[in-house]
Amino acid sequence: MVSNTDEMNLKCALGKAQSRCRLIRVACMVFAGVYALIWIAATVLALMGGNGLGSTSAVFYSVLHGALFLAMLLIFIALFGDVVARGVPLSVKQADRLRLIALLALALFFVDLAFDIVAVYQVSEPLDATFDINGGESANTINLNVV
């Protein structure tokens, strides 16, 4: 049997969770907006060939990586928005959303793994960071970042 004090403590804790989720949701929305703008700019620069990124693999990577990450952010926004709207921190719908986030994170891992097999990240002088595509070289390259 639940006492009156326990019920009040539970309602207070759920209220705090709701307010925290509201803040996290707003932060995710701001971050998603900023990320989307930077992602679009990076994709346009890759399409235009800016900074030596004109290859189709760089454009494909930029589009795929950005879409997966933005999808994860949008699911986080929906996840926290549902807590704010309903006041229920965990439901079957929320568990399904968390499962989808895990699948998107796994897909993001494989996209990065596939791209990193053929890409070498290099730091150029003075402060320029670029990457080169390993065009089927027989010898593998290892970036040690030794200056």
Image (cartoon, helix red, strand yellow):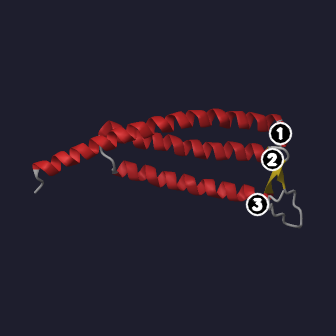
Element type at mark 2: strand
Query: Depth-wise, is mark 2 or mark 3 nearer the camera?
Result: 2
Residue that carries the numbered disc 3 in the rendered image:
117
Q: Residue 51 carries which label?
A: 1
Q: In which quarter of the image is the C terminus?
A: bottom right
Q: Going by the image, does 134 lie left or right of 85?
A: right
Of labels 1 and 2, earlier in sequence is 1
Residue at image location 23% in from the left, 43% down from the top: 12
Q: Going by the image, does 34 lie left or right of 119?
A: left
Quadrant of residue 144 in the image?
bottom right
Of labels 2 and 3, earlier in sequence is 3
Three-letter amino acid code of the residue under disc 2: Thr
Would you say the residues marked 1 and 2 are in contact, meaning their CB atoms lie under 8 Å apart? yes
Residue at image location 84% in from the left, 48% down from the top: 124
Quadrant of residue 26 in the image?
top left
User: Residue at the bottom extreme?
Assistant: 139
Of labels 3 and 1, earlier in sequence is 1
Q: In which quarter of the image is the N terminus?
A: bottom left
User: Residue at the right extreme?
Assistant: 138
Element type at mark 1: helix
Query: Depth-wise, is mark 3 or mark 1 nearer the camera?
Result: 1
Up-down: is 46 above or below 136? above
Three-letter amino acid code of the residue under disc 1: Asn
Estimate the x, y position of residue 89 in percent, counting from the top left. Answer: 33, 47
Residue that carries the numbered disc 2 in the rendered image:
130
Three-letter amino acid code of the residue under disc 3: Ile
